[in-house]
Image (cartoon, rainbow, N blue to C red):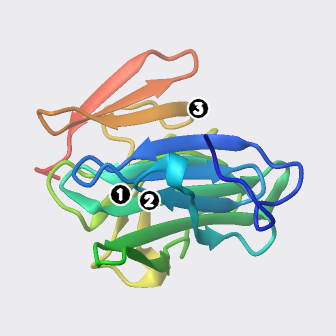
Amino acid sequence: KGPSGSNVKLDSYITRVVIQPTTYTWIAGNSKGQIWYTANPAAGWNLLDQHPFDAAVVNMSFAPTDHEILYVLYNASGNHSYTRIYRYEMNPGPPVSWSAYPITDNFPNNLIPRTITGDGYSPDIAYVGTDKGGVYRWDISKQTYESWRNYNLCLPGAVDVRELIVAPDKVLHAATWGRGLWKVVTGQV
């Protein structure tokens, strides 16, 4: 059973669901930019955050090295100014709470983010697959004007990346639209 009640935006539907691997907290994002969480879906849901312009949650992923870090992509079709990339940090509590950190920074506004994942070696690095620019890498240690950089190692640059996954061997895999599957070991770069 998904989120319900007066706080759920009208005409919204669930776009993504992830489950936190250590506490089994369910996270659900919807088409109106709301993120909900619960440890027991039958017992009710709590609002984690809301996009200021109701842009849809298009992708979510827990950091592979720290399951208390959640990366989220928000996007509104055709309106790049509503694109947002967030890093949420879970405070296990009790009660559970979340801290939100916008990390959109210098992400190119001419690209549409499609998928996001953390790094297999560091909880402070994330990757976004885009509609036509390949993969971009975010590093928390960089200044906001340079935190996002093109990261098309072993990948054709002008490619539509539909899914990013970090395998148990810490290798980053990129599934593209029409250009196959690519992989790179990220920890050495």
Residue sitting at the far bottom: 143
Q: Which tag is nearer the camera, tag 3 or tag 1? A: 1
Residue, x 76% and y 43% (percent of image)?
Answer: 13
Along the viewing direction, whichever of 85 and 178 lies nearer the viewer: 85
Q: Which residue is mark 2?
A: 71
Q: Which residue is mark 3?
A: 160
From the image, which quarter does the N terminus lie in? top right
Asked if residue 48 can be seen in this view, the reply is yes
Image label count: 3
Front residue of 65/155: it is 65
Cα distance between the residues tagged 2 and 3? 20 Å
Q: Residue 102, percent across and down?
A: 52, 77
Which label was assigned to residue 126? 1
Q: Nearer the viewer, residue 13 or 53?
A: 13
- Which-is-in-front pick, marks 1 and 2? 2
Label 3 is placed on what type of residue? Asp
Q: Residue at x 58, y 32 (%)?
A: 160
Q: Is residue 14 left or right of residue 99?
A: right
Give whichever of discs 1 and 2 has the lower sequence position: 2
